[in-house]
């Protein structure tokens, strides 16, 4: 078994085809084409991502991807990378293979100037990242919702649709009185000079150009529920966040959306959305990280409340 690391631009045509084959066999019900793969992982501020490959008898049987973006940490621009799209074919899925695959990617990222690795592992891989890969656990991301039609979330509650419609619209109306424009400036923030254009280049992301702010959202069906996800608001304040939620509601009225959602950290209580208790959450949005360059990054990065973080920071949506 061989383990190698490459940039997206260094992958051969055969390797890309084999990676897509691994993806299609690993994530049942989903598929990707070589053109889509290359477009996705080339769409970064540096023009490529980092890929570690597990190769058996000349064939790719496993992949781990690190996607680089610039972040501002203590006023200095640093290259971070989030890990995503980890996939290994059946028959090769053991702890030692996963460990070797990840360690190759970690070493390569450090060599390429990445200061910090982070990820949002699912239930299956969370323990592997924390116990095996030495990632530190940060507080999981919160889920905020505006239930436009509660029956679309849980069919047995369909009779309460009218009530949820009234309550949600009252919340949205009340949020008009959220006038606090104090902008939050966290310790870790996205480098706006490069982030927005790369992250939201795809046509599936829709932009909101509001009064003194910009936002991005996407409509997606998750667990059978058509949901409008608010992904990013800049600059972030109670006023801009609530304004973005109202704008997203207006723009998606014709889409038969049942739920408005924001997943991330907010340093304030929004009037337009409800924070979902963790016991009612449909899933845990784990958040983990590992410092690679201790000359630039310190342990304060391991606190979620020091971050500007949401679904914008990885490619779930």
Image: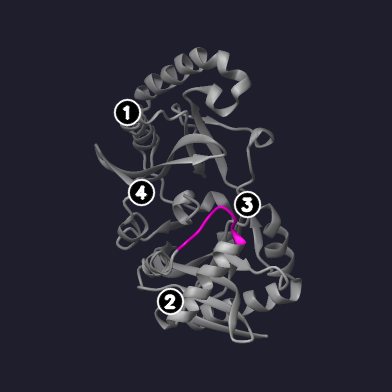
Q: Are marks 3 and 2 in contact (CB under 8 Å)?
A: no
Q: Is residue 97 magenta?
A: no
Instruction: Look at discs 1 and 3 and give the one toward the viewer.
Output: 1
Q: Give the colour scheme shown.
A: one colour
294 vs 236, left or right, is right
Q: Residues within 10 Å of mark 1 (few under 14, many from 20)?
A: few
Of marks 1 and 3, which one's residue comes earlier in the chain? 1
- Name the quadrant containing residue 233: top left
Query: Which label sits on residue 8?
Result: 2
Q: Are marks 4 and 3 in contact (CB under 8 Å)?
A: no
Q: Residue at x 69, y 35 (%)?
A: 279
- What's the magenta region? 26-32
- Whole-number angstrom distance, CA of label 1 to CA of label 4: 17 Å
Can you identify the residue that label 3 sits on? 286
Residue 183 sits above or below residue 308 on the image = above
Quadrant (top left, top right, bottom left, bottom right) of the N terminus: bottom right
Of marks 2 and 1, which one's residue comes earlier in the chain? 2
Q: Residues within 10 Å of mark 2 (few under 14, many from 20)?
A: many
- Whole-number angstrom distance, CA of label 4 to CA of label 2: 23 Å
Q: Residues within 10 Å of mark 3 (few under 14, many from 20)?
A: some
Can you identify the residue that label 1 sits on? 250
Query: Which label sits on residue 30?
Result: none
Of marks 4 and 2, which one's residue comes earlier in the chain? 2
Residue 268 sits above or below residue 20 on the image = above
Can you identify the residue that label 4 sits on? 204
């Amino acid at each position: 078994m061989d383990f190698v690391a490459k940039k997206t631009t260094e992958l051969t045509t055969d390797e890309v085809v084999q990676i897509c084959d691994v993806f299609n066999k690993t994530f049942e019900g989903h598929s990707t084409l070589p053109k889509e793969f290359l477009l996705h992982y080339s769409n970064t501020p540096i023009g490529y991502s980092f890929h570690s490959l597990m190769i058996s008898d000349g064939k790719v049987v496993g992949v781990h991807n690190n996607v680089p973006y610039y972040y501002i940490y203590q006023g200095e621009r640093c290259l971070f990378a989030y890990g995503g799209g980890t996939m290994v074919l059946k028959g090769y899925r053991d702890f030692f293979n996963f460990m070797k695959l990840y360690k190759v990617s970690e070493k390569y990222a450090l060599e390429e100037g990445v200061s910090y690795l982070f990820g949002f592992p699912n239930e299956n891989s969370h323990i592997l990242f924390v116990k095996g890969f030495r990632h530190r656990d940060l507080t999981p991301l919160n889920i905020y919702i505006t239930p436009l039609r509660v029956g679309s979330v849980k069919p047995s509650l369909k009779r309460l649709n009218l009530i949820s419609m009234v309550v949600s619209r009252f919340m949205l109306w009340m949020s008009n009185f959220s006038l606090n424009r104090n902008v939050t400036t966290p310790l870790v923030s996205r480098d706006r000079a490069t982030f927005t254009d790369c992250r939201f280049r795809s046509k599936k992301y829709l932009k909101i150009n509001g009064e003194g702010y910009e936002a991005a959202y996407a409509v997606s069906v998750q667990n059978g529920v058509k949901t409008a996800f608010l992904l990013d608001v800049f600059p972030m304040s109670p006023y801009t966040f609530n304004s973005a939620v109202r704008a997203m509601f207006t723009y998606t009225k014709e889409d038969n959306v049942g739920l408005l959602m924001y997943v991330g950290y907010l340093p304030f209580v929004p009037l337009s959305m409800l924070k979902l208790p963790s016991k009612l959450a449909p899933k845990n949005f784990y958040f983990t990280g590992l410092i690679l360059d201790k000359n630039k990054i310190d342990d304060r990065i391991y606190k979620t409340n020091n971050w500007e973080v949401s679904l914008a920071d990885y490619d779930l949506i």
